[in-house]
Amino acid sequence: MSVEAKSKSHSIRAVNALRALIFAGELPPGSDHLESELAKKLGMSRTPVREATLVLESQGLLEVRPRKGVRISALSADDMREIYEVLTELESLAASLAADAHYSEQELSRLKSATLEMEASVAANDRESWARADAAFHDELVRLGGNKRIQTIVSNFNDQVRRARALTLHMRPMPQKSNEDHRALYEAIAKGDSKAAREIHWRHRTEAKDMLINLLNQHGLRRV
Amino acid sequence: MSVEAKSKSHSIRAVNALRALIFAGELPPGSDHLESELAKKLGMSRTPVREATLVLESQGLLEVRPRKGVRISALSADDMREIYEVLTELESLAASLAADAHYSEQELSRLKSATLEMEASVAANDRESWARADAAFHDELVRLGGNKRIQTIVSNFNDQVRRARALTLHMRPMPQKSNEDHRALYEAIAKGDSKAAREIHWRHRTEAKDMLINLLNQHGLRRV
DNA sequence: CAATTTTTTAACGTATACATTAATAAATTT
DNA sequence: AAATTTATTAATGTATACGTTAAAAAATTG
């Protein structure tokens, strides 16, 4: 039995299933879908589907447009800039908080191992594996920050830009510089230097934002 | 006919009505309420009420606890710290963005008038009026930042700490220093000095956070 | 034929009936 | 009487019926 099928309610299963369909590109950005279609596709009635769409709308993944169906969100370069501005700021805060927490090496081990994985991935020229380690690094960073609100917001926003990241992953040069940033950030956190941690990550994210937006523009990806 | 009654759907009216009941303290923090009770109170069926509770849950105002009713969120001092950390960071970013936008005096007029109102309120020893002007100032600041995502998050978080602010409004000394901060921030934005704008507002919010948390602790307000 | 009005259609919003299931109470056992 | 099992209750989760209403299609008018 799949994980989804174990979920208590159809409503929760609908949220997970719709997210999965969106991330898989089966419900592409900008496309419209009637409640009844989605209900049929998910094998349930409209009620739990409606509830799921409200939740996903509040997370910015789609928009409920009465009588026109739900529209899967399509982000412009400007939307991307807005989201990255917030991600930059909140992750930098998390980095600063993590440094102030004075974690032991033991407690920072997952952060460390993510940096090692990234370095190995770059050496092996494996972008997919690098992207997974990069995501793990950022997740762990935010977790170490210890602020649950930041975790929730960052998680939502990462969902929203997931497609754009996937699209541009193979357009980028191998992230050599990025790995140096991660290592420097790790050191700052281990030393408890919150000011440095904040600044290193802020620059790191700002550069990533500019890179992403330039790539989208260069490749004529108006909305993703 | 009231504004709420004009709203298209019962579902939207339920969201507004429940928010109003929460802010008015009629649904106090920590209290539980069955869907059917709320439906009866709002004069509609459970369906739109359920939809409203899902929306409000995603905004952090309540928690849906199956078979135990919805529980109105009660924030601890630590929750408050988390929320203020995020508010501090995002409003500071908004201040920085506003400065970078190089607005004209005309465009900054509402920000200016809010500072004047605050000064008049302090002179008149009128805390309620000061609080309204302060809220207007912060709203306008975030609006001038121009980032819609920041506006949404800040608005949600302000809703969550609204009760705590109201509770502590009359425990505070008259906000003399606060007005000086606002004036300095206005000047920094008018000059286009984004670094100063960010730092001034960051300190301002950090001090407000410490003040609020101290007041809650001193007065034994464990959860609000 | 264009513009307007009327009619039709169908998607949504809501109420309601019912199935499900967690929590409680009652009964039974030890 | 305590512990366990069984039965009951009631709140939720879901499906469905139906009224409402926006959009589309058809009919009418100028």
Image (cartoon, coloured by chain):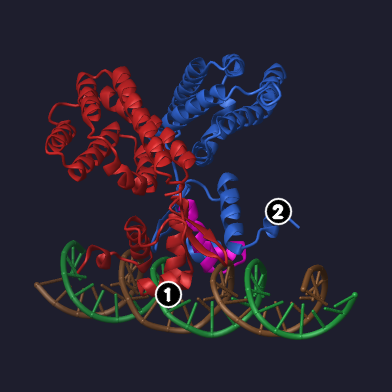
Chain colours: A blue, B red, C green, D brown
Give the residue number, with chain letter if any, for mark 1. Answer: B45
Are dots 2 and 1 on a single chain? no
User: Which residue type carries mark 1?
Assistant: Ser
Residue B113 colored in magenta in the image: no
Query: Marks 2/1: CA distance?
Result: 33 Å
What crowding class fits label 1: few (fewer than 14 Cα within 10 Å), some (14-19), or many (20 or more)? some
Residue span colored magenta: A39-57
In screen coordinates, is A214 left or right of B140?
A: right
Question: Is residue A88 positioned above or below A200 on the image?
Answer: below
Residue A168 horizontal/vertical position (percent):
54, 29
Of the pair B140 and A77, the residue shown nearer to us: B140
Q: Label 1: state its secondary structure.
A: loop
CB within 8 Å, label 2 to label 1: no
Q: Chain of mark 1?
A: B
Residue B159 horizontal/vertical position (percent):
36, 48
**Comparing marks 2 and 1, which lies closer to the viewer?**
1
In screen coordinates, is A46 left or right of A112?
A: left
**Tag on residue A3?**
2
Q: Answer yes or no: is residue B110 visible.
A: no
Residue A50 colored in magenta in the image: yes
